[in-house]
Amino acid sequence: MIYKKRKRKQYQDIEIKKPLYNNFVYIYDRIIRVAIKNKRLLRIKMPQGVGIADPREWIKTGKKMEKVFLRPDEPMILFGNYVIIEKEKTKDEKLEELARMGVFG
């Protein structure tokens, strides 16, 4: 029996339903640490769009916040930062890019 080698997941997906203000979001420390351990990038999905960030840079440049939710003895550590949203290309832009690459001859 031949087994296919599974591709490793490239991104750690995070879905944000409502950012704090504009594109600023806080992410739980453990999610970032897991992404670093598994060598993944953070893919942050928001209503405004999708952004990709490096977890190490997120920790370096982000604002650290400790917030108590359920357990008063163990506050959650959150890192906040601005998400740079990648603009989706329109059909015209995709066709122009293909034409520049010489696909249409």
Image (cartoon, grey):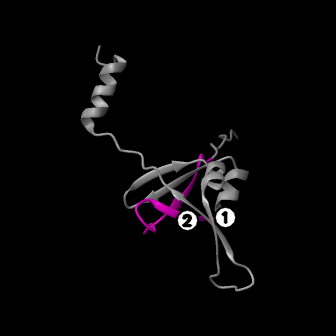
The verdict on residue 31 being magenta is: no
Q: Which residues are magenta?
A: 9-28
Q: Residue at x 37, y 44 (%)?
A: 87
Q: Which residue is mark 1?
A: 29
Q: How many residues crowd mark 2 within 10 Å: few (<14), some (14–19), many (20+)?
A: some
Is 52 placed left or right of 87 in the picture? right
Residue 12 is situated, as x and y percent measured from the top left of the image, at 59, 54
Residue holding disc 2: 26
In which image quadrant can residue 48 be found?
bottom left
Compared with 29, 99 (above or below) is: above
Give the residue at x 62% y 82%: 69
Magenta span has 10?
Answer: yes
Q: Which residue occupies the foreground of this view, 78 or 105? A: 78
Q: Residue at x 43, y 60 (%)?
A: 46
Which amino acid type corresponds to the residue marked 1 in the rendered image? Asp
Q: Quadrant of the N terminus?
A: top right
Q: Is residue 69 placed above or below 88 in the rendered structure?
A: below
Indicate the position of residue 30 as horizontal and vertical percent values: 68, 64
Looking at the image, is 35 positioned above or below residue 17?
above
- How many residues crowd around disc 1 within 10 Å: few (fewer than 14), some, or many (20 or more)? some
**In the current view of this chain or complex, which residue is farthest to the left?**
92
Q: Is residue 46 left or right of residue 93?
A: right
- Tell me where residue 100 appears, x and y as whole percent: 33, 20
Q: Name the kind of residue labelled 2 in the image.
A: Tyr
Marks counted in the figure total: 2
- Which structural element holds mark 2? strand
In whole angstroms, how far apart are the C-alphas of marks 2 and 1? 9 Å
Q: Residue at x 28, y 40 (%)?
A: 90
Foreground residue among 103 and 47: 47
Residue sticking out furthest to the top: 105
Front residue of 96 and 65:
65
